Image (cartoon, rainbow, N blue to C red):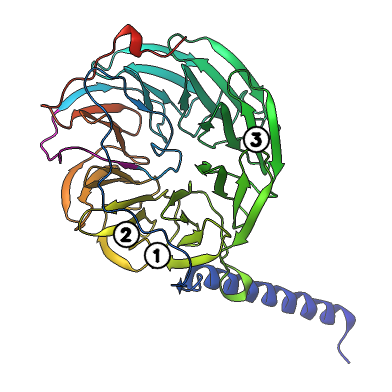
């Protein structure tokens, strides 16, 4: 008979061994058994028209890049009337020491940049002159949004150590706070404004709809898990993913859930992952990457899974989606495996795959026929959208790479913002008094 003390030791040892095996199997499952690729060809897909997208207006009219991703669908596609090619001469730089994880937006003659230390900067597009700055809070990790003379910002922490987020509305032309609302939990959602309502998500699992002019709460909905990425909007609905691995469609007017789906899990019930990326909406689908290493496409109507395509590692990157001339509807996304992927938007099949200079964490941006990304080892690169061939690269930037107004290319460095001449012969963007939105 085994003595009780020895039996207890054996029991502890066996339990410890089983725990070690379980941890090892779990780690193996997450790393090596991510969800397999899926293709459901019968899921509805809206084929694009043959017409080319109209480039944004230039010349005497005002120019706005109002939200992260450029459009309310967050497609990250900025068309150009004429293809641009290097050299892109450096025009100006606004240098700093605080991290720039997310890039600026543009409104009128200015860029608006929210640094990770919670400071909002207004920077003149042509000269790089800092018109004003205002410290809104302690910590931020998002891009602002613009609507009718107001800049909207979200803060992870309004005050250091509180773990409470904040939404702040600031006058676009001088640093006056119009309204501010403290949230019970942190928020790093890049806001979006539709028809006078600003929408954000939060780490507490709630989505908020606030009246843009005064911050009045229109509705809030609890989706059950942290919402990190931005909300995409299309035809009265909001689309986004959460940290439980579910993708949602909400009625933008009421906050009512229309559908909520999971993209599927890997071996041992693991690998379902979390959605950090901002969703993109195009062609009757919502496209979003997951930290389980897969890119997903769901039907807008009912959330049915259209396809799932795996990469070699996490996808934090927000995808760019466009109908590329000569190629067709394509999804561009970067992965922590150090590759850029161009995927067929209908089927998820790989059009091309290119090795990047390092891991890709930030979003992808199309400027004309060039696709831009930044890597964590401080490179920003432009590839041909149709071919994946390298066009231009600089050793600046880590996260979200660039925006443009058609004349200049604004590059989001690690701690500094840079402007390059994208098309030096393009008409200069100027403003008249009539062009400026009301104060």
Location of the N terminus (image quadrant) = bottom right
Quadrant in which residue 435 is drawn: top left
**Which residue in the protein does label 3 denote?**
208
Q: Evaluate if marks 2 and 3 touch, with contact meaning CB atoms under 8 Å apart.
A: no
Which mark is nearer the camera, 1 or 2? 2
**Which residue in the protein does label 2 denote?**
341
Image x and y of residue 211, in percent: 62, 25
What element does badge 3 sit on? strand
What element does badge 2 sit on? strand
Residue 88 is inside the magenta segment? yes
Tell me the CA gap for discs 2 and 3: 33 Å
Say few, some or many: other residues with alpha carbon within 10 Å of mark 2 (under 14 / 14 to 19 / 20 or more).
many
The magenta stretch spans which residues?
77-89
Q: Is residue 8 above or below residue 274?
A: below
Residue at 34% x, 46% y is 364
In the displayed structure image, the side of residue 203 where residue 60 appears, left or right = left
Question: Residue 210 versus residue 57: which sits nearer the camera?
Answer: 57
Quadrant in which residue 120 is drawn: top left
What element does badge 1 sit on? loop
* Residue 339 visible somewhere in the drawing: no
Tell me the CA gap for discs 3 and 1: 33 Å
Residue at 65% x, 28% y is 161
**Which residue in the protein does label 1 denote?**
311
In the displayed structure image, the side of residue 22 where residue 86 appears, left or right = left
Q: Is residue 169 above or below residue 155?
A: above
Q: Evaluate if marks 1 and 2 touch, with contact meaning CB atoms under 8 Å apart.
A: yes
Q: Evaluate if marks 3 and 1 touch, with contact meaning CB atoms under 8 Å apart.
A: no
Image x and y of residue 200, in percent: 58, 35
Residue at 23% x, 40% y is 395
Residue 259 is labelled as none
Tell me the CA gap for discs 1 and 2: 9 Å
């Amino acid at each position: 008979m085994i003595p009780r003390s020895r039996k207890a030791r054996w029991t502890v040892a066996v339990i410890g061994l089983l725990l070690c095996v379980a941890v090892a199997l779990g780690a193996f499952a997450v790393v090596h058994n991510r969800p397999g690729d899926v293709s459901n060809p019968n899921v509805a897909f809206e084929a694009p028209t043959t017409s080319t997208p109209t480039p944004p207006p230039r010349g005497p009219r005002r120019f706005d890049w109002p939200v992260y991703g450029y459009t309310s669908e967050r497609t990250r596609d900025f068309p150009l009337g004429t293809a641009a090619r290097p050299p892109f001469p450096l025009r100006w730089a606004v240098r700093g020491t605080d991290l720039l994880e997310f890039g600026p937006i543009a409104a009128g003659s200015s860029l608006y940049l929210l640094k990770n230390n919670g400071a909002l900067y207004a920077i003149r597009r042509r000269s790089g002159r800092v018109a004003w700055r205002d410290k809104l809070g302690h910590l931020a990790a998002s891009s602002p949004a613009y609507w009718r003379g107001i800049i909207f910002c979200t803060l992870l922490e309004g005050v250091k150590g509180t773990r409470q987020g904040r939404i702040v509305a600031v006058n676009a032309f001088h640093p006056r706070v119009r309204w501010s609302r403290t949230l019970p939990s942190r928020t790093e959602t890049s806001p979006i404004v539709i028809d006078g309502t600003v929408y954000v998500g939060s780490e507490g699992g709630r989505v908020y709809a606030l009246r843009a002019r005064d911050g009045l709460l229109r509705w809030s909905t609890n989706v059950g898990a942290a919402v990190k990425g931005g909300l995409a909007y299309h035809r009265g609905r909001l689309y986004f993913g959460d940290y439980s691995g579910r993708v949602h469609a909400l009625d933008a007017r009421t906050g009512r859930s229309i559908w909520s789906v999971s993209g599927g899990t890997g071996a041992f019930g693991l690998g379902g992952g979390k959605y950090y990326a901002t969703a993109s909406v195009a062609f009757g689908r919502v496209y979003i990457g997951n930290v389980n290493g897969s890119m997903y496409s769901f039907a807008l109507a009912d959330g049915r899974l259209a396809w799932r395509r795996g990469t070699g590692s996490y996808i934090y990157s927000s995808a760019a989606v466009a109908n590329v001339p000569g190629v067709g509807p394509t999804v561009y996304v970067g992965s922590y495996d150090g590759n850029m992927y161009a995927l067929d938007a209908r089927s998820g099949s790989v059009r091309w795959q290119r090795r990047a200079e390092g891991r890709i964490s930030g979003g992808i941006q199309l400027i004309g026929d060039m696709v831009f990304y930044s890597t964590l080892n401080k490179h920003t690169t432009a590839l041909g959208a149709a071919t994946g061939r390298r066009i231009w690269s600089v050793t600046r930037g880590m996260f979200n790479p660039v925006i443009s107004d058609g004349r200049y290319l604004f590059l989001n460095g690690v701690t500094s913002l840079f402007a390059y001449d994208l098309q030096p012969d393009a008409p200069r963007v100027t403003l008249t008094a009539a062009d400026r939105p009301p104060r």
